[in-house]
Image (spheres, rainbow, N blue to C red):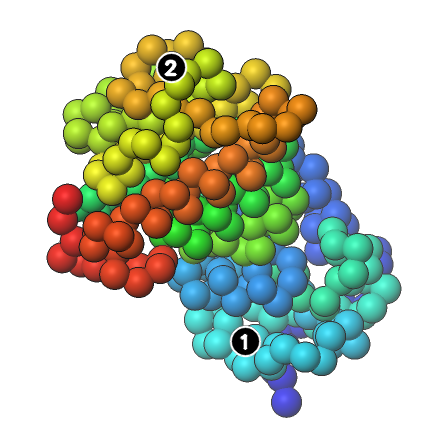
Amino acid sequence: MMQFHEEISSVQNPKVKQVVRWRDRPDRDESQVVLAEGYRALVRALAGGYPLDEVFVCPELFPGQQHEEALLEQLRLRGTRLIRVSPNAFAKMAYRDRPEGLLGVGPQRHRTLESLQLSPCPLLLIAEQIEKPGNLGTMMRSSDAVKVDGLVLCDSRTDLYNPNVVRASTGNLFTLPVAEATTAETIPWLKSRGIRILATSPHVDTLYTEVNLAEPVAIVVGAEQYGLTRPWLEQAELVVRLPMLGAADSLNVATATAVMLYEALRQRLAAGVVRDPGRVPDSADC
């Protein structure tokens, strides 16, 4: 039997209204909160040690195929307040089309470059001026899958804590090391650590499979419409292209990112830098 700290039945409850306001970025940023809706998002927040202050719960909406009660008990033991909410009130708060009866509220975390803990042979993804939350969330999933040392958002045009980023990342936002910085800060930071910069461009001959990605490297991808800005192209030690054999002249940025990251993983597996997919051994060296 689940234990709740509070119960809410009215859609006019102040907490319900506050969650609705947090859908808009100015209100989220003013309160410095992030909304995590759904079972997977809460599981990954728990796994990543991401603190959740409150979780709104509507058992009537549980899909019945998960382990919600066990998850909620773990959250309660970590100090999260559990608030039972009526179906009508939860429907008003929910961001997803098919709510699962779970919605968490936690603090925003804004990390710097210096907060990233780099392995001996780091692999980083640099995302410059990404605009679409869905793309950013999908890039987080790919980054988590290959276990990058960090995702750096440069001069971002997307709200890191947009609910669509959380949803598209399937909660990997809470497990992935994400830093925010400017291009002017990031380029010298990479070079001072001996991390080679790899940029993509359709105007070069070198294919992405023809360069060494089993060394310290930062894969840099740019805005959906315009690509990378000049500083990245000028400072990159490696510039490669993806072959395009059809009428299309470019891939979706999230798709291109997945292709590049998995080529890096393939090479690192072959070189012994990574022993198992997604796991970089502590003793790995370049």
In primary-sequence order, the first of circles 1 and 2 is 1
The image shows residue 58, relative to residue 198, as above or below, that is below
The percent coordinates of residue 167 (x first, y second) are: 63, 51
Which of discs 1 and 2 lies nearer the camera? The answer is 2
175 relative position to 55: left or right:
left
Q: Secondary structure at mark 2?
A: helix
252 relative position to 114: left or right:
right
The residue depicted at 65 percent of the width and 62 percent of the height is 38
The percent coordinates of residue 39 (x first, y second) are: 61, 67
Q: Residues within 10 Å of mark 1 (few under 14, many from 20)?
A: some
The percent coordinates of residue 91 (x first, y second) are: 82, 60
Residue closer to the observer: 117 or 245: 245
Q: How many marks?
A: 2
The image shows residue 250, relative to residue 78, as above or below, that is above
Q: Alpha-carbon distance for marks 1 and 2?
A: 46 Å
The residue tagged 2 is 233
Q: Secondary structure at mark 1?
A: helix
The residue depicted at 25 percent of the width and 28 percent of the height is 196
Residue found at the very far bottom of the displayed protein: 1
Q: Are marks 1 and 2 in contact (CB under 8 Å)?
A: no
Residue type, mark 2 in image: Leu
Q: Quadrant of the C terminus?
A: top left
Residue 226 is at least partly visible in this image:
yes
Which disc number belongs to residue 71?
1
Q: Quadrant of the N terminus?
A: bottom right
The percent coordinates of residue 18 (x first, y second) are: 71, 48
The residue depicted at 56 percent of the width and 68 percent of the height is 81
Q: Residues within 10 Å of mark 2 (few under 14, many from 20)?
A: some
204 relative position to 226: left or right:
left
Residue type, mark 1 in image: Leu
